Image (cartoon, rainbow, N blue to C red):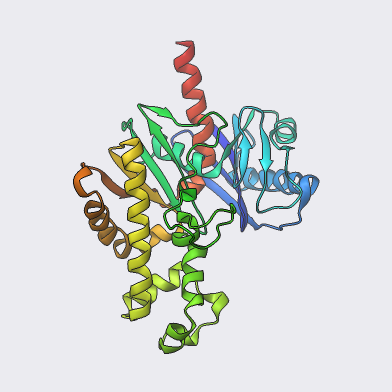
Amino acid sequence: MSRYILGFDVGGTKISAVIGDEGGNIIAKVSRPTVRHLGKKRLIQQMIEMGHSVMEKAGSADVSKIGIIFAGLVDSEKGIVKVSPNILGLNNFAITRPLSDEFGVEAVLENDATAATIAERVYGSGRNVDNFVYLTLSTGIGGGAFVNGRLMRGAHGMAGEMGHMVIMSNGPVCGCGRRGCLEAIAGGRGIARRVAENISAVRDSELFSKVKPNEIDARTVFEYKKKGDMFAQLIVEETIYYLAVGIVNIVNILDPELVIIGGGIANAGRELFQPLRAAVNQEFKSMYRQVKIVRGMKNGHDIAPIAVPVYLEGLEAKASG
């Protein structure tokens, strides 16, 4: 009989609570918008309320573990949010303890991109693949990797910050403070910025000229490209080139057999993946090797907080065995 896991995804735009089983099946889900000034006490209160609500919705009051994924820098061993870029007042926040006390089970914490990488290893395309990279293309760009069957964490638990490699010297300023990071150019916010900066091209575009600047996002750009807008096509082609450069950089360093791409921009489907595969193959030059590029699980962020405790439990079982 599968045990149920309570999972939380604390992100920049929404907070979700899910109930899932060890097989990765999501039984119930509730979501709330993220309030930037929520603070520690009110966030915990909201998560507790959402936890009880989703358990009631699932018809289950019995969970064996709690998984929490967070969009920020975390200390997963101590269960502490170290840096919170999206919700104010959460730096150095011991988030797991009050939830563990409330629900009476162990709670584990993981960075959201690392958790999505783990989810691909446990339930997705990364099963039985010892060397793969996961990239999440959303507002920003994050990721993670398994190398020789082990999750790559690094000396400070910060490995996998794929979006913060510089690929354009003296390029636009990134949120990290450096210039020309992959995230600043090819992340969702970077794509929207590149459109908005070219005022003359926006005015000349029949489609973009009818949209308010704050309504332009990556989804809009790919949608307009499909409709034949030449400016959107240029932006998409540039984005794919920058992503290809970044992916080949990663492949040259880690030599994975698989690159899994998730996040909202992956929803562009063939409009993204077909030209991206071709651009990556071309960018390899004489360093070419066989690497598959596949789409991540569509519900990866729902499954990620379930996958983390399942994965950690599997590691413990191996260690004790």
Residue 50 appears in the figure: yes
Considering the image in quadrants, where does the C terminus appear?
Answer: top left
- Judge left or right: residue 197 versus residue 50: left
- Judge left or right: residue 130 versus residue 2: left
- Residue appearing at x 60%, y 31% in the figure: 65
Eyeballing the image, is 318 above or below 197? above
Q: Looking at this rendering, what residue extends furthest in the top direction?
A: 321
Task: Identify the image quadrant of residue 206.
Answer: bottom left
- Residue appearing at x 49%, y 30% in the figure: 310
Q: Which residue is more in the foreground, 228 or 182?
A: 182
- Residue 161 is situated, as x and y percent measured from the top left of the image, at 50, 44
Task: Identify the image quadrant of residue 277.
Answer: bottom left
- Residue 158 is situated, as x and y percent measured from the top left of the image, at 54, 37
Q: Which residue is more in the foreground, 106 or 148?
A: 148
Residue 24 appears in the figure: no
- Residue 295 is situated, as x and y percent measured from the top left of the image, at 34, 51
- Residue appearing at x 44%, y 30% in the figure: 151
Q: Looking at this rendering, what residue extends furthest in the front direction?
A: 170
Q: Which residue is more in the foreground, 193 or 149?
A: 193
How many numbered badges does the structure rendering display?
0
- Residue 274 is situated, as x and y percent measured from the top left of the image, at 25, 60
Eyeballing the image, is 145 above or below 206? above
- Residue appearing at x 47%, y 87% in the figure: 209
Eyeballing the image, is 270 above or below 159? below
Q: Which residue is more in the foreground, 25 or 133?
A: 133
Eyeballing the image, is 196 above or below 55? below
- Judge left or right: residue 37 versus residue 305: right
Q: Looking at this rendering, what residue extends furthest in the right direction?
A: 41
